[in-house]
Amino acid sequence: DLHSFPTRRSSDLHIALDSLVRARVLADQAVKEGADKEKETATIIELQRLGVLQNAMTKKFVEATKPTEEELRREYETQVASMSDKEYHARHILVQTEDFAKNVIQRLGRGAKFEDVAKRESTDPGSKDNGGDLGWFTPDRMVRPFSDATMALKPGEYTKSPVQTQYGFHVIKLDETRDLQPPPFDQVQKQLDQVVRMKKFTTHVDELVKQAKVEKSL
């Protein structure tokens, strides 16, 4: 209802102002009673102050920094060099014990269909109903033991030993692979701009830390 909008807005503003007044009154009283001098409270106040100043400094530096196209191109080449040149389409069966994973592998060896076993036995709710299908992914999207095992397979093969990760024990089947082309420079230029700005800020902070004399105490 458009007619009620100004009323709601005024009400919200009144509540916000009332909360601000109450917070200020309580804060002033706390200072009068010396609460701001208590060690734990003083530490929290100082940490919050440092956080606000840090965020302000980060914003100011990043907004004032303008990467050159040469810097962006160099960062693009760095990112491309670190990317995988392949994507993998794989399935998995996740179980909680190594013995059960070995049992699954034995069943597959006797001719059981991978998708059917995944639907019955896998504990991964995200892929179980799809026969363990994880879709297409690059190695960096998976935990290291999983991605290493996947890359070692040929299309159609599955792991003959359980692959352990923090999630449990996996039996992995590689369906297919395809070449991965990096996105064109123009398409990711904005993201590269942010990456370069933050790298410059990190370098700037490192230099400030080197020059500063800070006493560390517990």
Image (cartoon, rainbow, N blue to C red):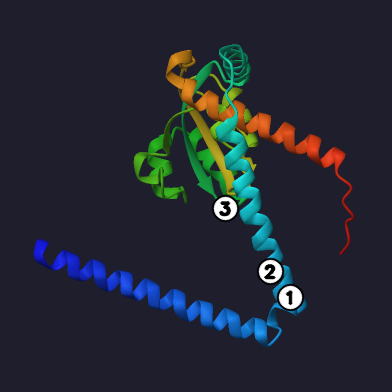
Residue of label 1: 40
Q: Nearer the viewer, residue 133 or 20?
A: 20
Q: Is residue 129 above or below residue 184?
A: below
- Residue shown at the point (42%, 39%) measured from the top left: 132
- Pinpoint residue 166: horizontal percent, then vertical percent: 63, 48
- Pinpoint residue 171: horizontal percent, then vertical percent: 54, 38
- Pinpoint residue 133: horizontal percent, then vertical percent: 41, 35
Q: Which kind of residue does numbered mark 1 sit on?
A: Glu
- Residue shown at the point (60%, 52%) measured from the top left: 97
- Residue shown at the point (21%, 69%) measured from the top left: 8
Query: Contact, CB < 8 Å: mark 2 with mark 1?
Result: yes
Residue of label 3: 96
Left/right of residue 213 with respect to residue 121 in the rendered view: right
Query: Contact, CB < 8 Å: mark 2 with mark 3?
Result: no
Q: Which kind of residue does numbered mark 2 sit on?
A: Ile
Tell me the quadrant of the picture where the N terminus can be found.
Answer: bottom left
N-terminal of the two: label 1 or label 3? 1
Local secondary structure at mark 3: loop
C-alpha distance separating marks 1 and 3:
44 Å
Q: Which kind of residue does numbered mark 3 sit on?
A: Gln
C-alpha distance separating marks 2 and 1:
6 Å
Left/right of residue 74 with respect to residue 104 in the rendered view: right
Residue of label 2: 44
